Image (spheres, helix red, strand yellow):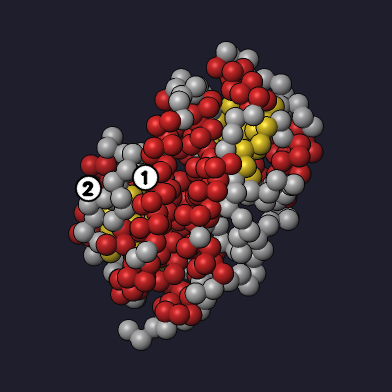
């Protein structure tokens, strides 16, 4: 290979390397304001009949871990893309609903339309990176991420949203944040350590991605966050075909596509379903496609993530996918993450 790896080093590349700082700034700024604590108390006391979790793109996928946490705690959350909610879920805009809305910009077309339709009927918690956005100004409570300005593809805003939503889960479920603090401190150091090997990860991945025509990211449980976001950022960064889905859904159709031009990143995930994901990875290889397991003991260095608690695993799982976006850009001889057709903020439904 004679790729010029320096060509990938644009604004998106710098945003990826800025993630440890962004995570630390976000953690420092998280605080439970009285209105947020009151909403959490109302939820636990049964004042809300439902919790609706909504967002678009990576903001939507970031909600998977919170959705599962609420289910484990006995709640019945509804997770729905904002684009669907504003057209097919308007009955949820009433005082018996607690809305958790994630939007990095806080001013995307769908978020603005949601604000117009809700008219402050349903109580709303906003998770956003833009403190002066319409969403932040009209929400009952705001959980701010402090990722700083992001050039194009979601990376540092995404991991900061995951962190903020984990903190919100602790608050809603009346858990001490001390354990999360310890886990996050370890995760922050782990992210920094993983990114220190960026050059090696990208070169290793570039070798494996030569000749690949289609890419899949698959997982189960909280790993669906990385599976969904992973495919999205590959398409945005590289104009390369990628699909993100559950490991089980992969067996319902995509399995038939397997050949030497297919690359599949399988997130091992939680112990409850890890064996199923490991078996899928093995079967994909047996069918002649390339498959690598993203796990602390992966034999493939770029997919080897630190062994940390499941609460912070989603933050670590997206890192190998970010390396894939850089490797694909190097193979194509273009700067990673440079938009030519899309915009950072989606202003049209």
Q: Position of residue 225 (x, y in %)?
A: 46, 46
Q: Position of residue 250 (x, y in %)?
A: 36, 50
Where is residue 312, by image quadrant?
top left
Which residue, given by chain and number where applicable, does mark 2 sit on? 279
Asked if labels 1 and 2 touch by Cβ distance under 8 angstroms, the answer is no
Side of 143 where 248 appears, left or right: left
* Quarter of the picture holding the N terminus: bottom left
Residue 186 disc label:
1
The residue at 32%/70% (across/down) is: 200
Residue that protrudes farthest toward the top in the picture: 45
The residue at 22%/48% (across/down) is: 279
The relative height of residue 18 versus residue 52 in the rendered view (above or below) is below
Residue 103 disc label:
none
Secondary element under disc 2, as helix, strand or loop, is: helix
The relative height of residue 31 versus residue 345 in the rendered view (above or below) is above
Side of 195 where 31 appears, left or right: right
């Amino acid at each position: 290979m004679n790729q010029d790896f320096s060509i990938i080093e644009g604004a998106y590349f710098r945003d990826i390397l800025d993630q440890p700082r962004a995570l630390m700034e976000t953690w420092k700024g998280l605080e439970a304001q009285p209105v947020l604590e009151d909403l959490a108390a109302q939820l636990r006391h049964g004042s809300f009949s439902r919790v609706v979790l909504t967002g678009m793109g990576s903001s939507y996928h970031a909600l998977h871990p919170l959705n599962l946490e609420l289910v484990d705690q006995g709640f019945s959350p509804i997770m729905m893309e904002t684009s669907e909610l504003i057209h097919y879920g308007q009955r949820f805009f009433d005082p018996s609903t607690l809305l958790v809305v994630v939007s990095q910009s806080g001013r995307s077309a769908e978020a603005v339309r949601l604000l117009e339709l809700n008219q402050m009927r349903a109580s709303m918690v906003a998770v956003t990176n833009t403190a002066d956005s319409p969403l932040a100004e009209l929400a009952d409570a705001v959980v701010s991420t402090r990722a700083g300005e992001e050039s194009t593809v979601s990376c540092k805003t995404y991991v900061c949203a995951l962190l903020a939503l984990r903190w919100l889960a602790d608050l809603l479920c009346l858990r001490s944040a001390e354990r999360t603090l310890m886990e996050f401190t370890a995760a922050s150091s782990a992210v920094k350590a993983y990114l220190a090997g960026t050059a090696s990860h990208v070169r290793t991945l570039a070798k494996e991605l030569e000749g690949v025509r289609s890419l899949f990211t698959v997982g189960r449980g909280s790993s669906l966050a990385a599976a969904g976001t992973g495919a999205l950022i590959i398409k945005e960064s590289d104009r390369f075909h990628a699909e993100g889905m559950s490991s089980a859904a992969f067996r319902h159709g995509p399995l038939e596509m397997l050949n030497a031009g297919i690359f599949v990143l399988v997130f091992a995930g939680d112990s409850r379903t890890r064996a199923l994901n490991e078996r899928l990875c093995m079967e994909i290889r047996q069918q002649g496609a390339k498959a690598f397991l993203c796990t602390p003991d992966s034999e493939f260095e770029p997919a080897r993530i630190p062994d940390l608690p499941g609460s912070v695993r989603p933050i670590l799982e997206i890192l190998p996918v970010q390396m894939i976006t850089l490797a694909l850009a190097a193979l194509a001889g273009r700067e990673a993450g440079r938009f030519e057709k899309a915009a950072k903020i989606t202003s049209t439904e």
